[in-house]
Image (spheres, coloured by chain):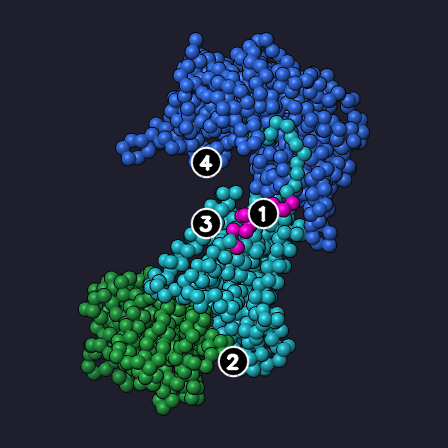
Amino acid sequence: MAFVLEAREIGKSFGPVEVLRGIPLALKAGEVHAVIGENGAGKSTLMRILSGHLQPSAGSLAMDDAPTVFANPVAAESRGIVLVHQEILLAPDLSIAQNLFLGREMRRGPFVDDAAMNRIAAAKMAELGARLDPNTPIRELSIAQRQLVQIARALLAPHRVVIFDEPTATLSGVEAEALFLAIHELKAKGVAVLYISHRLPEVKAITDRVTVLRDGRHVATRDAAELDPAGMARLMVGRDMANLYPPRTPAPEGEIVLEARDVAVPGYVETASFALRKGEILGFAGLIGAGRTELFEGLVGLRPCRGEVRQEGKPVSFRDAAQSMAAGIVYLSEDRKGKGLLLQQDLRVNLTLAALSRFAKSGLVAESQEWAELDKAIAAFDIRARRKEMLAGQLSGGNQQKLLLAKMMLLEPRIVIIDEPTRGIDIGTKEQIYRFIAELAAQGRSIVVISSEMPELIGLCHRVIVMKAGRIAGEVTGDEIAEDPIMFLATGVHEEEVVEMAAGAA
Amino acid sequence: MTENAIPTTPPPERRRFAFDLRAASPFIALLALILLGAVVNPDFLTASNLTNVVTRSAFIAIIAVGATFVIAGGGLDLSVGSMAAFTAGLMILTLNKLGGAETSTLLMAMGVALMVSAACGLFNGLFVTIGKIEPFIVTLGTMGIFRSLVIFLAAGGTITLRDSGMREMYRPIYFGSVLGIPIPVLAILAVAGLGALLLYKTPFGRHVVAIGSNEDVARYSGVPINRVRLLTYVIQGVCVGIAVLIYVPRLGSATPTTGLLWELQAITAVVIGGTALRGGVGRIWGTVAGAVILELVANIMVFSNFVSEYLVGAVQGSIIIIAMLVQRSLQRAR
Amino acid sequence: MKHVILKSLAVAGLAAGLSSAAFAQPKTVTIAVSIPAATHGWTGGVVYHAEETAKQLEKLHPGLKVIVKTSPDGAAQANALEDLMAQKVDALVVLPFNSDELTNPAREVKKRGTFITVVDRGLKDASIQDIYVAGNNPEFGRVAGKYFVDNLKQGNVVVFRGIPTVIDEERVTNFEKALEGSGVKVIDKQYANWNRDDAFRVMQDYLAKHPKIDAVWASDDDMALGIMEAIRQSKREDIKFVLGGAGMKDMIKKVMDGDKMIPADVSYPPAMIATAMNVTAAHFYGSAPMRGTYVLNAQLITKDNAKDHYFPNSPF
């Protein structure tokens, strides 16, 4: 059987640095093929070669057994290979339909045919399980919805091979289910799907074969049926990954350090009350748009918010982040690139930005002290940077998250709120971050983890509060912390029903 | 790009003496222009001519140092030219009102000038931060306001420093020199030196770059956005004031055309100097080089015998674009 | 501006009340004056003279109303013309920003039967105007040129041009024509935009570039002031004199006081707007209708006649 797309011993070097060596990869029509590996394993580079964004330094590509070269992404696309990017590449002020057809607008005579484009856009979005008005500007969509628009845009071109680069990184369970159904349909139509993800359970669930990369080399290609997530992790990391999560500690009974009573964030949270204890890791679950992020942005003064907030028994109200930081509360945004780090500035500037006053000596910033602090952070958080003058934007996602953690830890906070701590981060780095969160709690700090990844809430938290549509829907503790009760609180239905509903809708 | 980290991470090293071509390129362009000038006319390369040029660039250079703060912080100030004319007008009127040729009078008028310009900057800054109006619109508005105020003060004519004794006492601030260096050049060095210290070495400077780089990140990092932004406009105002202190002794007058188009020259100097117009990067010394480049191009035009006076503008524009092109290609070649 | 109109209404009303007893109803006439806003010393002078003349005329002719309107640029002036027409004026005195932009708006005004007086810069179509009052730009250049030929006889002259316009072109061409055949040579000319700062800059460059300059044609008094500073700074002794133009009061004063560097000036009086307004008023209140072209010749101002050109109260 001919392979639709084949990589034959592909290698790639950037200058003296070899990032890929001798990678074989063969895609069959009608299969879903996963590529997994840690950050830095070379997955994205391989994808960029397959989609014509980069030229291989060694080896060759073939389509239908005939050797081929893609001069650029347009050439690859004309041969039916489309890449769904991990980053959102949409024009925020244009509508969904305008974005879907950007650069390939449908025309009627000299004018664009908005009616036809809107119709098709609505249909395509519905196929992905999103019922949205095609006239909605992208700016008004959630990150997850934008991701779906991006996928719909890629699928608009005629395609034989679709490459998904971390499509579910920003999606919640229900939205991901809709995507899986769409992938299933692509497969049924005979399209080859290449799927990159850090979420191993979903790799297990939806793919047929799995190729594992480690340090730019090919480790194995196996049938998905032969592997379980732990086995995949072992192949990726090269050692046993049974203990992804740190050992569970008993729920702390210490004093309450932060308490919210009837807190409302206009437009997002109607009312929310909860309490956080010293040394506790408190999870916040819920669908995207449930108001989790906005609740905590409100609490730390980044958004207008009403209601009563008490820190260590005393009422507090923060007008901006500087005030909450001074009170020992830090918030790490889910949007690392947009709100967490200055991508165009170097590591040192990013590291010390929030705690800059500590580095000021008689009005001037003590640079030598900053460099020393960077050395410490690089060691303590295992930040892998080629050079110390690197820009934050040049770091991989996992290392950016470590840098953001290091930056906020300089403030020596007593309460740490982490929004989506491991979004888009490989499994090795995830383990480090989980371990780190557990250590913080052991030191007596209190942690809030907002996450859409159910396993990490289950594996990490002492207690999980579930939000639904701007309200607290309930709370699960101890042995109750499991997928089904959380899903039930978040959606109002049990998980099997969700899958059925999603299936019925498609 | 996220996967380009090398497989085995070597311990990161800091390059201590990395030659930053991007920061150096305005100075390379400056040298290239001086060479061009020498080729065009041998008389160009005399000490007195080059001194004249650098001295003349003082107003734009000093104003542009302030503009570097505003632009690095993601803002824009179009009102500096009108602000300079308005401040100069008020300063001369103060001198005329007080009369006499005492040092105290002069110091008082200088104080008035600095206060007026700082207040103008504060005015701009308040509308941008508290009023949340686009800086382009705010400063376009104040550009018109300050300009009309000068015309009003001058009743359409010229505001002239009347007291000839004062005129003679004040004159050396532009025409005088210390140890052979003209005072305006010393002023450029002092203002740029202070500016560089402020921008590169203080928490405030870091905050300016942070809000210009990404305002959201700065906000989430607890940076007092409004205060920092407001201060950039006040610094811009003070720089305009300092430029006026050197401008007034030169011709001793302010007219409705004083400072016309200075805002564009200042912005051009800032951009030639390597500061990003979208914010997030500020290069003080590059800005100074940019201001000297602008003055030098005009100087070379007068010195060239083969450019028709009708085409001076076209050649000037071309030189600036070519200089930028050379700079950009130097940066890419890195 | 507003108080001028209000006052004039009061005066007109009072005059009407007084005169109706002795005479028949006084003739009510409205004259609109459209001029550039004061952005340069010379236009500042125009505004000053226009406002002074408006006051005088209204006092002189009961029933006359003069509306003075300034505009910052050509497009604004075109709009201002439309607004003035809405106020039903009998005559329009206009000093246009430029010929091209304002010819059509002025023609529209003419079509309503309004009496039109054009000042200084001519319109494209001469049939629009009833009266044309102008300074003589070619003559301005010629008088200056002749002064150099007579007083310098031979030597090197540097020339400062204003803003690239027809006015500037006419002046400079005729200046150079007047020098033809003499020993006076123009060794350099550059635009300095009728601006003192620019003139200072260009003069510094001239001084660095040319080792010997015998005299300077500044062509404008504003520019002459910048030039003087640059010469003073250079401490050069080779420059015998600087000839400006327009008749700024500071410069006239220097001529009167016998300043060696400023021995003369060439007039191009902003008061020409006053002439135009007077002639226009005379058309309505005089015995005979007025028509035709009035050219105010550029005069050489020297120590002898400087007194006649000195207006200490004018801002210019």
- Mark 2–mark 4 distance (CA, rounded to whole Å): 60 Å
Asked if marks 2 and 4 touch (Cβ < 8 Å), the reply is no
Q: Looking at the figure, which quarter contains the C terminus of chain C?
A: bottom left
Residue A218 left/right relative to C133: right
Q: Badge 2 is on which residue?
A: B162
Q: Badge 1 is on which residue?
A: B19
Query: B41 above or below A19?
Result: below
**Which segment is the magenta one?**
B16-27
Query: At 51% across and 17% down in the image, what residue appears?
Result: A24
Question: Residue B289: x and y, percent?
Answer: 53, 57
- Mark 4–mark 1 distance (CA, rounded to whole Å): 37 Å
Colour of the chain lettered A: blue
Question: Residue C313: x and y, percent?
Answer: 43, 82
Q: Does the magenta stretch include residue B18?
A: yes
Circle 4 Cα neighbour tier, 10 Å, few/some/many (<14 / 14–19 / ≥20):
some
Residue A158 left/right relative to A31: left
- Do circles 3 and 4 both sit on a common chain? no
Which numbered disc covers residue B326? 3
- Chain letter of the green region: C
Of C285 and A134, which appears nearest the observer?
Answer: A134
Q: Badge 4 is on which residue?
A: A91
Looking at the image, is mark 3 or mark 2 earlier in the sequence?
2
Of A385 and C124, which appears nearest the observer?
Answer: A385
Query: At 26% across and 77% down in the image, what residue appears?
Result: C180
Colour of the chain lettered B: cyan
